[in-house]
Image (cartoon, rainbow, N blue to C red):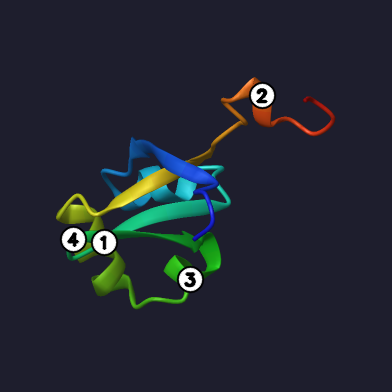
Amino acid sequence: MTARKYKEGKIIRSISDFDQSESEFNIVHFGNKPKTVHRSFLLSQQYRVLKQWIGHGMVFAAERIENERPDKQIGCD
């Protein structure tokens, strides 16, 4: 299993928040499993579905996780 590259950022609370978000990726909670999806995936959904997901608090902006362990950086022993 690979390490996660993104973590949950700010919750998207409205369609306006989604439109103004500059995040290329979003995290959507499908059941118990959050999934990182590209913005175009959400844009391709029907308006009512996206509005419902946002209304239920399922959509978050994704923030890139920087390498938090300096001992694992390239070139370090």
Q: Is residue 10 left or right of residue 26?
A: left
Q: Which residue is mark 2?
A: 71
Where residue 76 sits: x, y (%)? 79, 25
Mark 2 to mark 1 CA distance (whole Å): 30 Å
- SS category of the residue bearing label 3: helix
- Which quadrant does the C terminus fall into? top right
Image-based side of 77 in relation to 67, left or right: right
Mark 4 or 2, closer to the camera:
2
- State yes or no: discs 3 and 4 in contact (Cβ < 8 Å): no
For disc 3, the neighbor class at 10 Å (few under 14, some 14 to 19, many from 20) is few
Return the x and y of residue 64 as percentages of the image width and height: 56, 39
Location of mark 1 (residue): 33
> Residue 66's x, y, as percent?
60, 31
- Corner quadrant of residue 10: top left
Which quadrant of the figure has residue 40?
bottom right
Residue 27 position in % (x across, y down):
39, 53
The type of residue carrying mark 4 is Asn
Crowd class of label 4 (few under 14; some 14 to 19; many from 20; radius 10 Å): few
In screen coordinates, is 23 left or right of 46?
right
Mark 4 — residue? 32
